[in-house]
Image: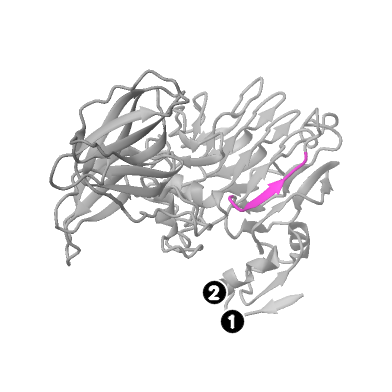
Amino acid sequence: MIRHSGCFNASLRRREAWGPRLTPNNSPWGAWAVNNIQDAVDAATVAGALVWVSNGVYRTGARAVYGMSNRVAVTKPVTVQSVNGPAVTSIVGYQVPGTTNGPAAVRCVYLTNAAVLAGFALTNGATQTSGDAYKQRSGGGVWCESLSGVVSNCVLSGNSASSLGGGAYASTLNNCTLTGNSASTYGGGAYGTLYNCIAYFNTAPTGPNYYSASLTNCCAFPLATNGLGNFTNAPLFVDLAAGNLRLQSSSPCINAGNNGYAPGLTDLDGRPRVVGGTVDVGAYEFQGPGMSEFIGWLQQYGLATDGSADYTDPDADGHNNWQEWIAGTNPTNAASVLRLSPPLLTAPGWQLRWSSDSAHSYFVQQATSLSTPVSFTTLGGNIPGLPGVTAYTDTTAPALGPAFYRVGTGSSNSATPPSLQVPVLVPASVTLTWSSVTNRTYALERATNLGAAPAFWLLQSNLAGLPGTTSWTDTNAAGSTPRFYRVRVEN
């Protein structure tokens, strides 16, 4: 079917739900919506047409080229590009259970001459184990007819080949990240030409990360000598095990690329492709301290990573996504929010401590005079004993005049009489409780007014968060002056 709009780019977001769609480069006014990527490629009739692919995991269907099945076969010189990047747009091949490569394996993508693939995650691709070593057994992630086939802004991981190029074969890769790919002979990561790429943590008997490849401004091991600007330092991903391949702030890949090979204006997250004047190496551009972790967190909750969701509040709890990330709370659950509960005021009193054990329970009594007849009033009963010492605070003690105490156990306990220590005066206090998580530390602050510029003073810092809630007691809360409290996340 054909759909028209006033301007294709302006209505792009509105039409993401259509699935893959084709836009001829010489006609920006319309787009043909189809059900899968292969149908969109097949529908292209103009060289250089642009096929936009919406969010999704594309793991069904197959098209054979040279006797090797491909999840998507780009047999025309067109550009296939994701709308929102590999975090939400994946092409998944098929690996044979038990053997990985084999007759039923499906490669992720085939690219013909002058075809371009941009902004995808290519995973789980594999090849056959017999037949032509190049056409049927190479390029588990992507196989290109020649170096004119270009792959840019893509992540290739977990692909395998029984011959060459576990991740990519005979392609030109720009600002891609290749990790966790394997080949049975040569080039676990890639066999081709790489610019501004990371090829690390791939495996093969010869050339684990690349083989017979020309590398320029790439992070790969061992050092590539057939190109300039290459280095072997580990890329320092945020969390390789969790699949967050963005860069830590200390990564050697930051500002280490060549701007002449930078593909487009945005990286895989849809954020600026060049930050700091020089393009980074790999699929993701470092956006600033903490941003790599934050963007991975957005991805975890299925939120847009291109910046459009940074300050939105999808669960309407009053905290935007950036604030929820800092607090370690769930941005999709309104009940998960950093919130200070009403303070609990404890009046001044006498703290009683006595020798005890966990096998007995105790009672505490008070009298205001020891004149005959002595009259004791029970303050608390059935108090569970603790090993060594148990404490109880009497907040009902008379403001003026004496108070006398005794502690004991029920007659059925038959315990050795406890030894009561000298009571200690406990000042008035306020116990503060707030929602918390275990991977954050907190600080509590206090002010005496909430004027135009309230002055908050630090009470306590570096309070380790507990699961659910954490509490802290302010023992210096006496006086008639109002007290106002706030809690903040430190790290």
- Name of the residue lying farthest toward the top: 416
Residue 58 higher or lower than 366, as above or below: below
- Name of the residue lying farthest toward the front: 373
Whether pointer 2 and pointer 1 mark residues with C-beta atoms closer than 8 Å, the reply is yes
Q: What stretch is highlighted in magenta?
A: 87-94
User: What is the quadrant of the C terminus in the image?
Assistant: top left
Residue drawn at the location 69% of the way across and 28% of the way down: 183
Residue 66 in picture, x, y percent from top left:
83, 42
Camera-side residue of 461 and 232: 461
Q: In this view, does 314 lie to the left or right of 478?
A: right
Residue 303: image quadrant is bottom right
Which residue in the protein does label 2 denote?
Answer: 10
Q: How crowded is mark 2: few (under 14 residues within 10 Å), some or many (20 or more)?
A: few
Residue 192 is covered by the magenta coloring: no
Camera-side residue of 485 and 406: 406
Q: How crowded is mark 1: few (under 14 residues within 10 Å), some or many (20 or more)?
A: few
Q: Element under label 1?
A: loop
> How much space separates mark 2 and mark 1, taking CA atoms?
8 Å
Please state which amino acid type lies under the numbered disc 2: Ala
Please state which amino acid type lies under the numbered disc 1: Gly
Q: Element under label 2?
A: helix
Residue 319: image quadrant is bottom left
Residue drawn at the location 69% of the way across and 68% of the way down: 18
Residue 90 is covered by the magenta coloring: yes
Q: How many marks?
A: 2
Residue 6, numbered circle? 1
Residue 181 in picture, x, y percent from top left:
65, 32
Is residue 196 visible in the rendered image? The answer is no
Is residue 245 visible in the rendered image? The answer is yes
